[in-house]
Amino acid sequence: MGITSRYQEAWEGFWSEAPREPGAVFWDSEPALTAGIHLALFEPHLTAPGLALVDLGCGNGTQTRFLADRFPRVLGVDVSAAAVAHARDADPAGQAEFRQLDAAEKTEAEQLHAELGDVNVYMRGVLHQCEVADRQPLVDSIAALIGERGRAFVVELAEAAGPVLRGLVQAAGGPPPKLAPVFAHGIAPGEVADAAVPEFVRSAGLTVLASGSLPLTTTEFTADGTRIELPSNWLVVGHPG
């Protein structure tokens, strides 16, 4: 299926204009508050931790570089060439690898699997930023990537995040500075029903091995200095057996 050209152009525009400083993007929180917490939930369910890990929707690679210290090979992929350029520039030591990939196009995922074999997958907050028609194909691609031995950690905004985001956007002074560019580029986060994500997983032939809820930390703060956190749900998924 693949993503629409409008959608890809929106992401290219966003990342082309995004500041390079760490934490300048709304969701670019430090790994200790993000991938580090997720990894503690993910690792107990890995049956093959020696596999390569794919950070799907890696953006500027902040979490990817953290994960590269904990897995033998880590590849960050993103639909946006500008995001991949950011990630490479921020990783001069080459801790991780980065490349452009349309994960909603299953043939691209299958080609990557043919290259790497089974992998483990980390995906944070990508489904809710996809267009509706791309959500099942994206999870189908995860199934293709992990194969029989891999596992995937998927974390997405919960339904309860919708009212929080709407409140931020509709605030008297307008949306917070780091959130405004997301909407300005037409990447308004869509709401995914909490029950829909496990259904995507089942339809892809995968099994939910573990799940839970936790706040998803952002880099933005309210006027009183409180860090903005969004409700999220996480899943560990794999092939049955």
Image (spheres, rainbow, N blue to C red):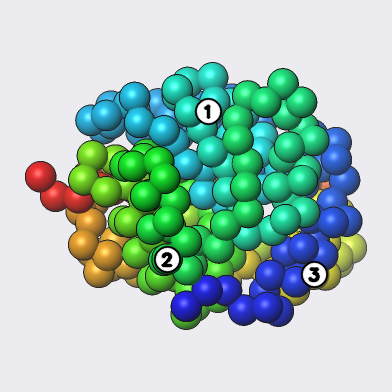
Residue 183: x percent and y percent? 77, 68
Q: Is residue 181 above or below residue 185?
A: above
Amino acid type assigned to the residue bearing label 2 in the image: Thr
Residue 129 coordinates in the image, percent (x, y): 58, 65
| Residue 31 can be seen, yes or no | no
Residue 185: numbered disc: 3
Residue at image location 38% in from the left, 58% down from the top: 110
What residue type is disc 1 on?
A: Leu
| Secondary structure at numbered mark 1 | helix
Disc 2 versus disc 3: distance between alpha carbons? 28 Å
Front residue of 37/79: it is 79
Q: Residue furthest left?
A: 241
Label 1, label 3: how far apart the Cα atoms are: 29 Å
**Residue at the location (40% across, 26% down)?**
40
- Asked whether, in this view, residue 187 is left or right of residue 42, the answer is right
Q: Which residue is mark 1?
A: 67
Classed neighbour count for the residue bearing mark 2: other residues with Cα under 10 Å, few (<14), some (14–19), many (≥20): some
Residue depth check, mark 1 versus mark 3: number of the one nearer the observer: 1
Tell me the quadrant of the picture where the C terminus can be found. Answer: top left
Tell me whether the residue at label 1 lies in contact with that at label 2, contact meaning CB atoms closer than 8 angstroms.
Answer: no
> Mark 2 or 3 closer to N-term?
2
Q: Position of residue 95 (x, y in %)?
A: 63, 24
The local secondary structure at tag 2 comes to: helix
Residue at x 75%, y 71% (from the top left corner): 9
Please give left or right for residue 224 compared with residue 213 in the image: right
Residue 135 in view, yes or no: yes
Which residue is identified by label 2?
107
Label 3 residue SS: loop
Q: Name the residue type under label 3.
A: His
